[in-house]
Image (cartoon, helix red, strand yellow):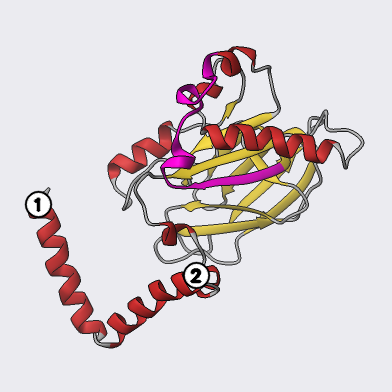
């Protein structure tokens, strides 16, 4: 059994929202995957289990929402396979995705004033996770996900973080401080998911694209091309495309 690469020690889940944990397990009859979150005293404060496991072994466990807090421990177990995974130091707080192109990808250590800002960065309650960049799931991506980790942002770690995400995290902290009485135990999770040179349309929902003339152009071109191809023709086109890509690489 393994979890998606983002589920690691020191991660942050969004507060006041259902908690979803997913991964893959070797499917055996009548198996159930359970997930439980324990507080510091060993009490279960949220738990859930699968309603089904897909034929390919993919599973999703949904747990009830929690308010801000931590550090907690999460245990994910496969009942029939007798497998157990443990995540330590997890928090329930604010989670934001920093997604986009090169302007989001640009690291803090290369930005204006970096030497001063990095040196002055204190120990924070900000946790950062960078999503490995791969077009398709491969063994190489699996290794990258295995090696990926959440880091707590401080003067030693902030330089590799997206500069936009870094400043945004402090802006959000200031905003919430003006609305909440105490942020001392509120942790922030920033998920960096970006790739320079990608089309901005890749980072927008279909509804967002349809809301503008420029965005609708992407949808119209796609639907027009799709209407001219049967599913069988598409499969043949994809095989040819994949073969050309392999030859090119």
Secondary element at image label 1: helix
Reply yes or no: does residue 107 show up in magenta. Answer: yes
Residue 217 x, y percent position in the rendering: 40, 75
Q: Quadrant of residue 56?
A: bottom left
Residue 51 x, y percent position in the rendering: 60, 66
Which residue is rendered at x = 36% and y = 52% of the image?
198
Say if residue 173 shows up in the picture.
Answer: yes
Residue 137 x, y percent position in the rendering: 33, 51
Q: Residue beneath label 2, please? A: 209
Residue nearer the viewer, 149 or 221: 221
Q: How busy is the neighbourhood of tag 2: few (under 14 within 10 Å), some, or many (20 plus)?
A: some
Q: In the rendered view, does 19 fall on the left or right side of 229?
A: right
Above/below status of 118 relative to 222 = above
Residue nearer the viewer, 212 or 124: 212
Which residue is rendered at x = 75% and y = 55% of the image?
64
Magenta-highlighted residues: 94-115
Q: Which mark is residue 220?
A: none
Q: Which mark is residue 248?
A: 1
């Amino acid at each position: 059994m393994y979890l998606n690469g983002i589920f690691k020690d020191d991660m942050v889940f969004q507060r006041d929202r259902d908690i979803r944990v997913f991964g893959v397990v070797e499917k055996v009859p009548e198996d159930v995957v359970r997930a439980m979150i324990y507080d510091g005293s060993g009490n279960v404060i949220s738990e859930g289990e699968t309603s089904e496991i897909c034929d390919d072994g993919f599973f999703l466990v949904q747990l009830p929402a929690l308010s801000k807090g931590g550090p907690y421990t999460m245990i994910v177990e496969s009942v029939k396979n007798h497998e157990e995974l443990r995540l330590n130091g997890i928090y329930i707080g604010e989670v934001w995705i920093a997604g986009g192109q090169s302007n989001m990808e640009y690291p803090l250590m290369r930005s204006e004033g970096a030497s001063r800002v990095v040196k002055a960065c204190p120990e924070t309650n900000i946790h950062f996770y960078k999503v490995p960049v791969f077009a398709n799931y491969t063994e190489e991506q699996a290794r990258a996900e295995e090696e990926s980790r959440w880091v707590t942002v401080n003067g030693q770690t902030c330089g590799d973080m997206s500069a936009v995400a870094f400043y945004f995290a402090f802006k959000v902290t200031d905003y919430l401080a003006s609305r909440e009485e105490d942020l001392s135990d509120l942790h922030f999770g920033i998920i960096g998911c970006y790739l320079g040179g990608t089309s901005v349309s890749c980072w927008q929902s279909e509804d967002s694209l349809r809301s503008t003339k420029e965005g609708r152009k992407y949808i119209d071109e796609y639907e027009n091309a799709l209407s001219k191809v049967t599913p069988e023709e598409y499969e043949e086109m994809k095989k040819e495309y994949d073969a050309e890509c392999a030859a090119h690489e």
